[in-house]
Image: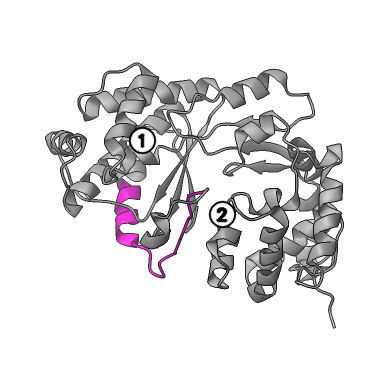
């Protein structure tokens, strides 16, 4: 019987093995989209336990645990210990067989900690203790782990109002062999006009940018200033989390009216929401193109769909994500034509990266 997780795991042909072992494995990692916490990289964070490293903010693991009937207090609660949380994850892992979580868990145990045992309730304590012992070593700090995996560059996920002080400080003080950390622009909060917190976010954007925002055109000016600030810190990427692409026609006056209604807290129709998002994404695409940035779309994920869990007061906001089986491709095709094909005659530096579906 073939051993699970051997050196040729998922490399099923000789060609695949040659391409990986003789070529890909020697290449550095350049990660253009990640959710690493910039502060942890800047401060070279030392993890107190494998629970903090694995379960501190991983909604994929939380979702699997909830599906397995694990109480929320063991996912995001503050009244349970690191061991208790890890023990519940170990109970869940065997039930994730054939899910990428099972593969990731054991690949990380092997490649980071040199542990080849399968995680289960029987091996949980032994693995927990061994990982925690190794995490005390300098090479298991945030930067140490990045170097271990030959990470050359990471692009974090950052809101336009972020001051990027961790990126700035890190770039100023990092050692020559430390990975590069660059910000990536994710303006979802400015796009999600239907959210109740939209008007407060616009006020925050106004304060950070120094632009008084009384209409949509003002908000675009404020975003432009922040876009330029991000570029000054090395950003060359944007990414946008959308459920689908939007292609509803609109006029400038309609967008201004929709914006004013949202700022007054009035309810918007589905058509108005989609018109605004179509306009917003078009403006962002033009802004990125003018700066020579690459644009990423993460679409097809329906977030926060468990309203009962979404409104619960827990330490971390739970994420409940589903991916529809049939993404809305007509809107994508039309949006792609509007923001890419049509202006192609006039522009020569547009770049788009499509990640379908997901984050």
Secondary structure under tag 1 reads helix
Q: Which residue is drawn at the image coordinates 62% and 41% (left, top)?
A: 36
Q: Which residue is drawn at the image coordinates 77% and 71% (left, top)?
A: 13
The quadrant in which residue 224 appears is top left
The quadrant in which residue 17 appears is bottom right
Question: Is 328 above or below relative to 279?
Answer: below
Question: Is 124 above or below relative to 271?
Answer: below
**Residue stretch in magenta:** 316-337
Q: Nearer the viewer, residue 322 or 288?
A: 322
Q: Which residue is drawn at the image coordinates 79% and 29% (left, top)?
A: 177
Left or right relative to 11: residue 165: left
Spatial CA span between label 2 and label 1? 34 Å
Question: Is 185 above or below relative to 314?
Answer: above
Left or right relative to 153: residue 230: left
- Give the mark nearest the N terminus, 2 or 1: 2
Q: Which label was assigned to residue 26?
A: none
Left or right relative to 285: residue 184: right
Q: Position of residue 265 (x, y in %)?
A: 19, 39
- Residue behind mark 2: 76
**Residue 11: within the magenta?**
no
**Residue 5 visible in the displayed image:** yes
Mark 2: few, some, or many residues within 10 Å (few <14, many ≥20)? many
Secondary structure under tag 2 reads loop
Q: Nearer the viewer, residue 29 or 130?
A: 130
Residue farthest bottom in this picture: 1
Mark 1: few, some, or many residues within 10 Å (few <14, many ≥20)? many
Q: Position of residue 198 (x, y in %)?
A: 29, 38
Q: Which label was assigned to residue 284?
A: 1
Q: Describe the colour scheme in one phrase.
A: one colour
């Amino acid at each position: 019987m073939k051993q699970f997780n051997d050196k040729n795991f998922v490399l099923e042909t000789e060609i695949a093995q040659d391409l990986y072992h003789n070529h890909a494995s020697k290449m550095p990692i350049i990660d253009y989209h990640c959710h690493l916490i910039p502060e942890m990289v800047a401060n070279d964070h030392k993890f107190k336990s494998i629970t903090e490293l694995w379960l501190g903010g991983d909604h994929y693991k939380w979702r699997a645990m909830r599906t397995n009937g694990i109480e929320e207090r063991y996912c995001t609660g503050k009244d349970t210990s690191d061991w208790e949380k890890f023990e519940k994850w170990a109970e869940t892992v065997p039930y994730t067989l054939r899910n990428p979580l099972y593969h990731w868990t054991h690949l990380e145990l092997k490649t980071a900690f040199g542990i080849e045992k399968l995680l289960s309730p029987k091996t949980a304590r032994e693995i927990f203790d061994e990982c925690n012992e190794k995490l005390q070593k300098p090479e298991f700090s945030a930067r140490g782990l990045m170097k271990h995996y030959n990470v050359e560059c990471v692009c974090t996920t950052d809101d336009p109002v972020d001051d990027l002080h961790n990126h700035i400080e890190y770039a100023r003080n990092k050692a020559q062999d430390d990975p590069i950390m660059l910000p990536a622009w994710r303006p979802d909060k400015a796009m999600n006009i239907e959210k109740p917190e939209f008007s407060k976010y616009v006020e925050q954007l106004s304060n950070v940018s120094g632009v008084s925002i009384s209409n949509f055109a003002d908000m675009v000016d404020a975003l432009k200033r922040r876009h330029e600030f991000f570029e000054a810190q090395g950003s060359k990427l944007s990414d946008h989390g959308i459920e689908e692409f939007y292609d509803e026609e609109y006029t400038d006056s309609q967008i201004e009216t929709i914006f004013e209604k949202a700022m007054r807290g009035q309810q918007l129709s589905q058509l108005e929401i989609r018109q605004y998002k179509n306009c917003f994404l078009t403006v962002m695409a033009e802004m990125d193109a003018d700066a020579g940035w690459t644009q990423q779309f993460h679409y097809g994920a329906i977030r926060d769909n468990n309203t009962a869990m979404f409104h619960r007061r827990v330490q971390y906001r739970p994420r409940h994500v589903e991916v529809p089986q049939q993404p809305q491709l007509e809107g994508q095709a039309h949006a792609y034509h509007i923001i890419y094909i049509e202006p192609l005659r006039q522009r020569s530096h547009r770049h788009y990266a499509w990640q379908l579906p997901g984050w």
